[in-house]
Amino acid sequence: MNVPYVNLAAQHAPLKAELLRAAERVLVAGQFVLGPEVDEFEKRFAGLCRVPHAVGLNSGTDALILALRVLGIGPGDEVITAPNTFVATVSAIALTCAKPVLVDVRDDLNIDPALIEPAITPRTKAIIPVHLTGRPADMEPIMAIARRRDLYVVEDAAQAVLAEYDGRSVGSFGDLGCFSLHPLKTLNACGDAGVVTTADEGWAQRLRVLRNIGLETRDNAVAWAGNSRLDTLQAALVMVKLRHLAEWTEARRANAAFYRTALSDLPAVRVPAESPREKCVYHTFVVQAERRDELRAFLAGKGVGTAIHYPIPIHLQTAGLSLGYGKGAFPVAENQAARILSLPVHQGLRREEAEYVVAQIRAFYGL
Ligand SMILES: *Cc1c(COP(=O)(O)O)cnc(C)c1O
């Protein structure tokens, strides 16, 4: 059997007619940047996350950069986040010329709230909790610290659309929430796209200015800014997929539940837990496995595609060396980096494929 890690062609095949109709509509209308399709998409996305405003952008990375810019974060400021995130979280901080400050994570792969407070200095302006794998970070203590210490919170919800914590959508806790619609995310454009959510109308307006080269009106720029606009075509295509997102999310959750049960008696493979406070959406299903690299090679030999998100913590990547942390600075994240393995969990995964993946994992450990 061949079980690819992702299968975007299979995701799009049943949507082909609807996607082509949406593309044709945009082609005929002839508006390719922003416009009514983007407005409509923003309304629907805001409704999905139960937040007042959503602003469509060209990527999740620019979502993070512009969120920090809206908050006025820049040179001399510090922003706290986790070392095991996708590099874009930390790039965004560095690109505003603020200093990224990293703190270690817990077993849930998310930032350890107990380590945030000791990392706060008079220069700290914001915390970026990352809802890694589609599992919400522990927002109650994080928001309590932010309120007590007067810090902004920017959620990196790039992997977590529809995830919930205490019944509330991620992206609605912090001052701003950043989402990615990259092709490998669950809600995906056919190219790059991103979104920022916020309850603050002023910030939403500012984001619309900053995404459009600082133009407040057609002829007057009020800030230096780049071009981070959402393509109309992408907005139209994503709206087709929005209708299927709840069903895809449930399919991913069912796949995760299957793996969790089927691997529960295997001490060599620790499956992610899900607490009653959380609704995880499983952008990835990340186990922590003994002899991870051997297991991964074995599975590849059996036709099972896997991935590692992410093999090198930020502070040990070449760009991250300048942050001044060395090996050993974040023992939990570093230990996890050697053990984490993402199993296929996409919504198109068939039950017999998941059963095959489990059987191969058991075979590897001699069970
Ligand atoms: C994908 C991702 C991003 C960046 O999003 P792009 O749309 O690829 O720019 C940022 N943070 C995290 C955690 C991500 O997974």
Image (cartoon, rainbow, N blue to C red):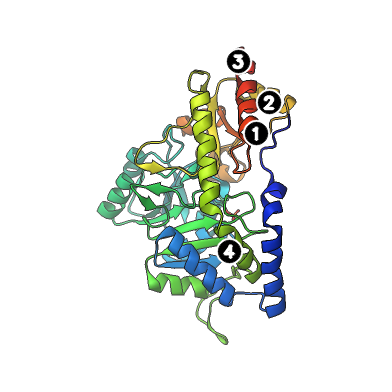
Amino acid type of the residue tagged 4 in the rendering: Met
Q: Is residue 213 visible?
A: no
Q: Secondary structure at mark 3?
A: loop
Question: Which of the two marks, 4 or 2, is nearer to us in this view?
Answer: 4
**Whether residue 149 is situated above or below residue 26 in the rendered picture:** above
Front-most of 228 and 364?
A: 364
Picture residue at 64% right of the left edge, 53% below the top: 183
Residue ID for mark 3: 365
Residue found at x 59% / y 13%:
367
Disc 1: which residue: 306
Element on which disc 1 rests: loop
Mark 1 C-beta closer than 8 Å to ligand 1: no
Quarter the N terminus occupies: top right
Residue under numbered circle 2: 299
Q: Residues within 10 Å of mark 1 (few under 14, many from 20)?
A: many
Q: Amino acid at mark 2?
A: Leu
